[in-house]
Amino acid sequence: MKIIVLRHEKTDYNIEGKVQGLTDIPLHKLGIASCQKLRDDLKKFSIDYVISSPLKRARQTATLVSDAPLFLDDRLIERNLGLYEGKDKSLYDSCLYADYDLNSTQNGVESVRDVLERIFDFLDEIVKDNDKTVLLVSHGGIIKFIPYYFSELPKHGILNAYTIDNGEYFVFER
């Protein structure tokens, strides 16, 4: 199985440096324009199907970059970032909320262990389809935890080793 993990393209909040979380906003015109180049690049993979977060920015990205059948899955939805949503990114302490030991839910932020559980549950299901190439379209706060599924998950410390920009992707083969 080949899994291509893509972060949605840019929104107004990305450009303005704001925290998005569950705030459901569409792509910015620059994000929409960037999808064409991404579409051309992804053609090399012969994608069998796409699974996307149902939030507008991910769903739009998915439909603009591939004509493969599209499925939506709530487990790919962005992490609930509670009181930080719509606020400047500088106010959000990503290390605090990525600390496996602390597992903080302060200010209404979804705990890191809850995020890991839903993502790992989702991945357990799709890796069974081992002869397919699948495109997953999701969000930075979710995608940063996916590599831990394919490597050993540390059971302590800060799980903040992976970052990905809007419109970037990485590939896992299993």
Image: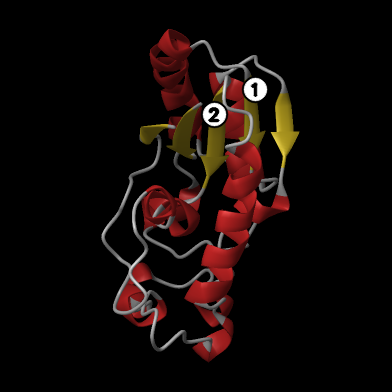
Side of 42 relative to 151 (left or right): right
Q: Residue at x 73, y 40 (%)?
A: 72
Q: Is residue 77 visible?
A: no
Q: Residue at x 36, y 34 (%)?
A: 170
Q: How many marks?
A: 2
Q: Which of the labelled discs sits on residue 166, or is there none? A: none
What amino acid is at disc 2?
Leu
Q: Which residue is mark 1?
A: 49
Camera-side residue: 95 or 102?
A: 102
Are dots 2 and 1 in contact, CB under 8 Å? yes
Callout 2 environment at 10 Å: few (<14), some (14 to 19), or many (20+)? many
Residue 93: x, y in percent? 34, 79
| Above-or-below relation of 16 to 52 | below
| Quarter location, residue 23 | bottom right
| Above-or-below relation of 19 to 108 | above
Between the residue at mark 2 and the residue at mark 1, the CA separation in whole angstroms equals 6 Å
In the picture, which quadrant includes the C terminus?
top left
Name the residue at the left extreme. 161
What amino acid is at disc 1?
Tyr
Q: Residue at x 54, y 71 (%)?
A: 85
Camera-side residue: 66 or 173?
A: 173
Residue 159: x, y in percent? 33, 68
Residue 83: x, y in percent? 55, 81
Residue 127: x, y in percent? 57, 37
| Quarter location, residue 126 | top right
Q: Which residue is mark 2?
A: 135
Side of 24 relative to 148 (left or right): right
Name the secondary structure under disc 1. Answer: strand
| Above-or-below relation of 130 to 140 | above
Q: Residue at x 55, y 38 (%)?
A: 137
Name the secondary structure under disc 2. Answer: strand
Camera-side residue: 8 or 98?
A: 98
